[in-house]
Image: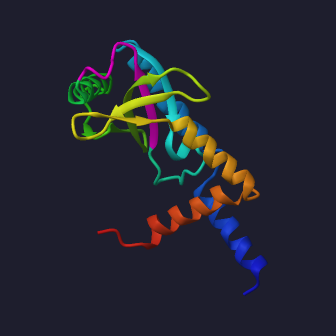
Amino acid sequence: MSANLVTNKFDELLATACRESSLPFAVREAEHFIEQLRARINIKRSLLIGSFASRTAVLGYSDIDYLIELADVGEERGTDSILLLLNAVVSDVLGGAPTEIRCPAVVFTLGQNQIDLVPACECKPHDEFPVYLIPDCWKGWQRSSPETHIAAIEQKDRDCGGALRRLIQLAKIWKYKWVCVR
């Protein structure tokens, strides 16, 4: 099998599982929901993070992750209470539909997509990218800088001639479609 044939098959697979045109609709739906949350909780900033932000999402498999910076929250407040508060507000906006706390996020389904909302508070003033505190799943906080991570993927993808994101998506497709996860 020639290298061009393999490349073409990979391109076909990526075109099917990672259609860019379908991704914005799912993100817009999530952003609309977050706007509904803003009416009930003081959100300072919402930030798309994870595979949709880094453009490595696989349709039908990747969840949509948002960091939700809450305006009146600092590290002195316990993460359990923050997760419970966000979970209650999300459930209320969904009209009582099922939600779940899967630390560090509140998880629910919106349309055909799983949404993960990660509550946060900013812990470091803006340098190039802000650093946030997010739940660490042991009732404490951990530092996270999703924009630094996204920028690093962007830079490495450029360094690799645009191949890194495609490789990540191929690995995800392989994992989701052909690997038995037990």
Q: Residue sitting at 36 percent across and 72 percent down?
A: 180
Image quarter where the C terminus lies is bottom left
Residue at point 63%, 55% (across, down): 165
Question: Which of 100 and 104 lies nearest the eye of the viewer?
Answer: 104
Q: Nearer the viewer, residue 112 or 81?
A: 81
- The percent coordinates of residue 35 (x first, y second) are 46, 19
Residue 88 occupies quadrant = top left
* Residue farthest along the bottom direction in this orientation: 1
Q: Nearer the viewer, residue 32 or 127?
A: 127
Examine the rendered structure and indicate whether residue 107 appears above or below residue 126: below
* Residue for point 51% across, 29% down: 47
* Magenta region includes residue 67: yes
- Which one is nearer the viewer's eye here, 131 or 166? 131
Q: Quadrant of the N terminus?
A: bottom right
The segment highlighted magenta reads 64-77
Q: In the image, residue 128 lies at what x, y percent?
A: 62, 28
Query: Is residue 4 rendered to the left or right of residue 86?
Result: right
Tell me residue 37's x, y (percent).
39, 19
Query: Which residue lies at the image location 39% right of the left edge and 38% below the top edge?
Result: 116
Residue 10 in percent (x, y) is at: 66, 69
Residue 65 belongs to magenta span:
yes
